[in-house]
Amino acid sequence: MASTSPQRLPEWARKGSPLDPSARALRVLFREKALNTVCEEARCPNLGECFSRGTATFMLLGDRCTRRCGYCAVATARPQPVDPEEPARVAEAAARLGLRYVVLTAVARDDLADGGASHFAAAVRAVRRRLPAARVEVLTPDFKGEPSALAAVLGAAPDVFNHNIETVPRLFARVRPQGGYRRSLELLAAAKGWPRSQVTKSGLMVGLGETDGEVGAVLADLRSAGVDIVTIGQYLRPTRAHLPVEQYVSPDGFRALEGRARALGFPTVHAGVFVRSSYNAEEVFAAAPSVSGRH
């Protein structure tokens, strides 16, 4: 996995995609509908590109997370009350944007009995009613491994169930202190074993100090859990208060990682410096011949 020193940001890790003036309409729409996007809250480097293409990832359940992950720019604070009208507003915004593929994620809500699972389900159903032809992908927290929460989400029949593993077991305590590596793997395996044929997806960051061997082991674990689609991207520090970048993986390094993942049998792999779990999600799903025909 070719990499460079973290002291200087290499040219390949600089994203040159300013926000197109036409994208202002998206921000106006999101403010009008009182909606959050993970693109904005997590300071995604792809925001300019995605907003300029008229797409975004909706973030449910407010903009305050109950967890404090070392890599994530979403605010940690006391959450706001659940807004039961939010799913309908998400569906209306998705319809206004003419989305054919809708990605729904959320902050972690450990303060709720079901972790927000019923709200995810309500949002999936609202989108289905408003846009019956659209595909829907959910990117969920781990729900503390609660089977009934997972069942609530999958009962709404999303096209893709996504939960990010994020990092290697050795780094979990530093990167995702309130998560658990085995818990995440078990969630993905349980989703894959759901009675209907469920497409599953997971994402991994590199650049936090993991070794090649550790990355290979995580990929093998994800494949053993039945994950269909894997995304691999470079960790980029959102602020100086977050974990430092330990190494930058080169484009050649990402091509090597993609090859390793494909050799393990993943039907679909999306790897690259700026790859994020929901980046180009529609195109990634459409390129998956073994899964994209399901509905």
Image (cartoon, grey):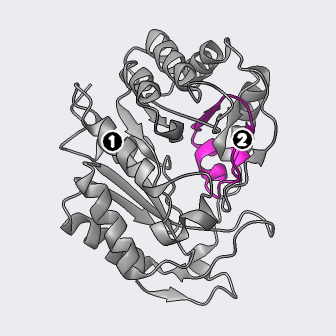
Q: Is residue 52 left or right of residue 272?
A: right
Q: Are there few (<14), some (14-19), or many (20+) residues within 10 Å of tag 2?
A: many
Q: Kindly indicate the quadrant of the structure image that contains residue 78.
A: top right
Question: Quarter holding the N terminus?
Answer: bottom left
| 46 magenta-colored | yes
Image coordinates for residue 65, horizontal then vertical, percent: 71, 41
Question: Quarter holding the C terminus?
Answer: top left
Which numbered dot is residue 65?
2
**Which of these two is toward me, 244 or 103?**
244
Q: Which residue is drawn at the image coordinates 32% and 70% (left, top)? A: 217
Q: Which residue is drawn at the image coordinates 46% and 9% (left, top)? A: 129
Evaluate whether residue 207 shows in this view.
yes
Evaluate whether residue 20 shows in this view.
no
| 47 magenta-colored | yes
Image coordinates for residue 277, horizontal then vertical, percent: 48, 51
Q: Which range of residues does the magenta coloring cover?
A: 40-68
| Element type where label 1 sits in the image | strand
**Which of these two is toward me, 287 or 24?**
287
Which residue was labeled with disc 1?
Answer: 200
| Element type where label 2 sits in the image | strand
Image coordinates for residue 193, horizontal then vertical, percent: 24, 35
**Which of these two is toward me, 141 or 267?**
141
Q: Are there few (<14), some (14-19), or many (20+) residues within 10 Å of tag 1?
A: many
Viewer-nearest of discs 2 and 1: 2
Q: Which residue is drawn at the image coordinates 65% and 58% (left, top)? A: 45
Q: Which residue is drawn at the image coordinates 69% and 75% (left, top)? A: 244
